[in-house]
Image (cartoon, rainbow, N blue to C red):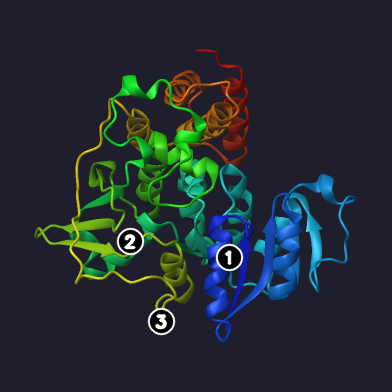
Amino acid sequence: MKHIAILGSTGSIGTSCLDVVRAHRETMSIEGLTAHRNWERLAEQCREFSPRSAALGDPSLSDKIPPDGFGSASLGYGQKGIEDIAASPDVDFVVSSIVGAAGLRGTWAAVESGKTVGLANKETLVVAGPLITRKLPETGATLIPIDSEHNAVFQALHCGERADVRRVILTASGGPFRGQSRSRLADVTPERALAHPTWNMGPKITIDSATMMNKALEVIEARWLFDLDVDQIDVVIHPQSIVHSMVEFVDGSVIAQMSPPDMRLPIQYALTYPQRQAGITPRLDFTETCTLEFSPPDREAFPALDLGFEVARRGGTCGAVLNAANEVAVGRFLDGSLSFVDIPRVCRDVLNSHDYDPSPTLDELFRQDRWARQETSQWKP
């Protein structure tokens, strides 16, 4: 029996994870669930899965909700409540799916406690990749990627020796504005940017896909997760979202992981690794005619991608600053105070003006995060 905690159980990754657990109750149990403010949905999940504990990230809710609506789960609040679940001795597998830098502390608590972490929160490695990767051997913790691209790389790497890897190729759908010039993106509205052609995700990740900032962050994550040189990472546009990523070996062989675009497959692979079990997701039908397209990204129209490669090379405080600036910029775009094309512009300006530290502590990373958020909130085109 695998004893699982889901940090961010009410979001798209969290609910998909519960779909997987629901189908494999004989081998998986839920020990802890967390949400930020969506206490009604969290309560429903607790009543169905009967975890030992639950937590709400917003402590202001502590005197506003009925404490007896969560079944048998003990209810905690704030960051401490989340970290207590991540570090609980009753838990052996932690799914880190809180969106943004807010997910770092919970992931850190799980890693410090030696857990196996199913990592859907790419910002953990974007912000603190060197610190996390150094901590893993100290505590015996393990990272298994859940996001589709890195999970695909994780699977493909098992087909050869790590020393024989020539490069990793991350695929990107291209989002709703694939093929459009930069000049046509100036008037993009939030409604258009939220209309992703293949994936059903939360608003922040969907906007990141539209700007290609999600791929920039994935480049940084791949650099730390797989111990790669930046020159070993490429990005290609693949609008069908069938090939989730590829690994090329030195002999020229390319191993691709393919499946329909459904997050429940990489989640199940992470939860059952190293075994495979019958899945609950749709299958590819190769008896039907289909076409798989690949093309290089348009870096002039989508300059966020270059930011990802730059930050992956520089390291230090750059990841914390880029991620924080992007989170605030996306929020400003959604509330109408920033244009779509201004998102990478403000990220570039804040990154260029920050006080770079090549070897920061965790506290320094959080300080730079706060600084970048303030700068971005005040930035004017």
Answer few, some or many: residues within 10 Å of disc 3's Cα (few below 14, many 20 plus, some between 14 and 19). Answer: few
Height in image: 321 above or below 284? above
Residue of label 2: 152
Estimate the spatial distance between the alpha carbons at disc 1 and disc 3, rounded to whole Å.
Answer: 22 Å
Q: Are marks 2 and 1 in contact (CB under 8 Å)?
A: no
Height in image: 340 above or below 124? above
Residue of label 3: 278
Q: Which label sits in the foreground, 2 or 1?
A: 2
Secondary structure at badge 3 equals loop
Estimate the spatial distance between the alpha carbons at disc 2 and disc 3, rounded to whole Å.
Answer: 18 Å
Secondary structure at badge 1 equals strand
Q: Amino acid at mark 1?
A: Val
Instruction: Evaluate whether residue 51 shows in this view.
Output: no
Q: Amino acid at mark 3?
A: Ala
Instruction: Evaluate whether residue 15 shows in this view.
Output: yes
Image quadrant occupied by the N terminus: bottom right
Residue of label 1: 94
- Sequence-earlier tag: 2 or 1: 1
Q: Which label sits in the foreground, 2 or 3?
A: 3
In this rendering, would 136 be left or right of 36? Answer: left
Q: Position of residue 185 (x, y in %)?
A: 37, 24
Q: Which label sits in the foreground, 1 or 3?
A: 3
In the picture as drawn, the residue positioned furthest to the top comes out as 381
In this rendering, would 108 be left or right of 277? Answer: right
Q: Which residue is more in the foreground, 306 or 352?
A: 306
Answer few, some or many: residues within 10 Å of disc 1's Cα (few below 14, many 20 plus, some between 14 and 19). Answer: many
Where residue 287 sits, quadrant-wise, is: bottom left
Q: Position of residue 72 (x, y in %)?
A: 81, 74
Secondary structure at badge 2 equals helix
Estimate the spatial distance between the alpha carbons at disc 2 and disc 1, rounded to whole Å.
Answer: 20 Å
